[in-house]
Amino acid sequence: MTAAAPEPKANMGKPLSRYDAVSKVTGRATYASDMPLANPAYAFLVTSAIAKGRVDGFDLDDARAVRGVIDIVTHENAPKLKESKLFSNGGYAGTTIQPLKSPDIAHDGQIIAVVIAESYEAAREAANRVKVRYTIAAPSATFDSPGTTTAAAKGQNAQFKEDPKVGDFAGAFEAAEIQLTASYDTPTQHHNPMELFTTSCAWIGDDLVIYEPSQYVYGLKNGVAEQLGIDAGKVRVVNPYVGGGFGSRGSMTPRTAIIAGIARRLNRPVKLVATRDQGFTITTYRAETRHEIKLGASRDGRLVALRHEGAELSSRADAYCVGGTKTTTRLYACPNVDSLVSIVRADRNTPGFMRSPPEVPYLFALESAMDELAVKLNMDPVELRRVNDTTNEPIGGKPYTSRSLMACFDEAAKAFGWAQRSPQPKSMAEGDWLIGYGCAATCYPTQMGPAAARVRLQRDGRTRVEIAGHEIGTGAYTVIAQTAAERLGVPLEKVAVFMGDSDLPPAPVAGGSNSTASTCSAVMMVCDQIRQRLFKAVMPDSLTDKAKETVGIGQAPTTQAAKSDRPLDLEKAFDTLGVGVVEEYGEWKPEGAPLDSFRAMHSGHVRLVGGHQMKDKIAYAFGAEFVEVRVNRFTHEIRCPRLVGAFAAGRIMNPRTARSQLMGGLIWGMSSALLEATEIDERNARYVNDNLADYLVPVNADVAGVEVILLSEQDDHINPAGAKGLGELANVGTNAAICNALYHATGQRIRKLPVRLENIEV
Ligand code: MOS
């Protein structure tokens, strides 16, 4: 086995190569904007140069003079669209700010016109010639800007129902032997997936086909239908491959219905490829956050009091928040816990999901504070986590379904060489470089949603799996193909998987790291329906009725001995049935899913369950991350030569794709600590570095060594696949591990991200 394909341990699948590897590296994989359209018109967006105010008028003569211009759509002549609610309030939209509805401007970079032309170049040229007259009002850009408003998150957002608390925090903190209070800041960040934000719409009579990179084809289909006021059955969303999501394509953005409306009016397909800088304002982003952590502990390191107060930026229109206190208040044993999340409203586009939305900023605060507490206690930070490890979360007392946090710490510490660390800050160096070692915990909720699948098996073993899941680069095709092949006992090469099309059976949003658990559980169930039909055909009459009911239904995937998992003579079963094809459709929902789950699934509403929301248990994946940083004494250049993470996430369906996910996560985590920040011109509430040259992301030279260790873990209390989500696990906590290592290297505690050389003061 190579490093890329780690040897499977117990409860892991085979490290098979990616199902879509060849089509991707040979350029055969078709992305949304690759789809051929008959005689398309091209759209180019004109976006607002001011953040607050109104459009007084346009001068379009120059633009219309460009050869090939077909139409220019503004609020004065735009197709009328219905509104959609924010997804967290039961709608489909990532923002309720609806451009082209009125002359009002709610944020910088809002769509104010769409130029349609015979070519992309003509549309772009004309868009650059559009002149806009504005009435400008003074915008509030961010925290501390005049004119922002602040209110508790609870009650503003249907998804944020409670500020977790237990016991008497104030009294316990007051009485604690050791007290720590510290504040932390995280910046605005943008997803910047490689594939741009594109939308192509083609009408065939009353039927609309949308090609758009989407993490949720059922959500987009139903959301656009709602906005256009047409039956959702008339809308199909297609995107077999997505060039990165990171959360930016999980909810509907306003551009889709606008382009669909224009295509209907023109009676011609319309294709939009928004520019990189437009992607910063026409979709969502990770909002800046602020935190205050208070920890009270006894001298032996046991937490007696914990308080986490968080503030998150949002738009005037929408109370979006991530509310990561649901996780930080439950990670460690502590009898007295308090928390509060607030939303600060400014004149900005509405933020949204981005790469482990709650945990990345909130665990930065908690895991930095834990390191600060370890320093105060003169205690090894790993031992501080051990002392506060728990089998039950402290808020409701519910047991974790499985929790391998300390096993992860021990494995990663060993692989990293943590024992060689001399604990004193500034005590390790090599030449001009100060060396720092740091660590932090990571965790991510195990989430699942209802999903449906259709599976067709032929007598020769050829298998077709259909499910409207999403391949956003994670390995979804691969693990689904693998699941069907294993379950049906057919060779992998005979399995074809179809995804990314809303005409296929519904699956949840590819978000919250739920996809593998949800889609594989559904596919397993439907494969079992097929097995049952075939087994029944060849079953001896002597079997009891009870046996007949369960025959063919697999046990846990690793259980070879189970009677019902016995191999099936496919050809004999088909011949006994006298058919050539067996096809089954089924709808699976996780334990604890609400009653309306299946109806919601078909209408594109997310019903994820799991994490802390389970009735009598709590399910999380865990990990531990260790990093080495080097800081140049003279130039303050920061390097991160080693990232080592150990992770436990239930059944690992495929160690190759899992490792790849986790490796990417560690790199994103480092990126989120040292590189990524969207700079804001506070006078104009405008993003400054809205391009890939100035918005820093890691390149190969920034990533010297990444080691991913997969721990064996079996959890029979989560879902039939036994899988916990790991897509978003590894980029949590890395930011804290890096700041903890920087403290060790330099003696300087840094509480504001990102950390750049100008922030080092040694
Ligand atoms: Mo992920 S930010 O849940 O798409």
Image (cartoon, helix red, strand yellow):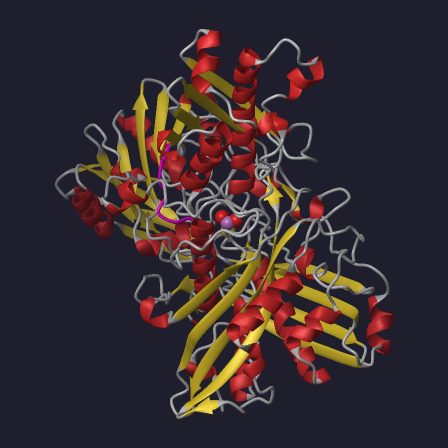
Residue drawn where x is 47% and y is 70% of the image: 643
Using the image, determine if residue 470 lies above or below residue 565. Answer: below
Q: Quadrant of the N terminus?
A: bottom left
- Image quadrant of residue 264? top left
Residue that sits furthest to the top in the current view: 578
- Image quadrant of residue 386? bottom right
- Is residue 338 left or right of 259 when viewed as pictured? right
Work out whether residue 14 or residue 296 is closer to the camera in this orientation and state it. 14
- Image quadrant of residue 253? top left
Using the image, determine if residue 581 lies above or below residue 191. Answer: above
**x and y, in percent, of residue 79 in the image:** 38, 31
The stretch of residues the image draws in magenta is 238-245
**x and y, in percent, of residue 51 in the image:** 43, 58
State whether the magenta stretch is mostly helix, strand or loop.
Answer: loop
Res. 101 in view: no
Residue that sits furthest to the left in the current view: 67
Q: Is residue 242 magenta?
A: yes
Work out whether residue 46 or residue 654 is closer to the camera in this orientation and state it. 654
Residue drawn where x is 49% and y is 68% of the image: 644
Res. 649 in view: yes
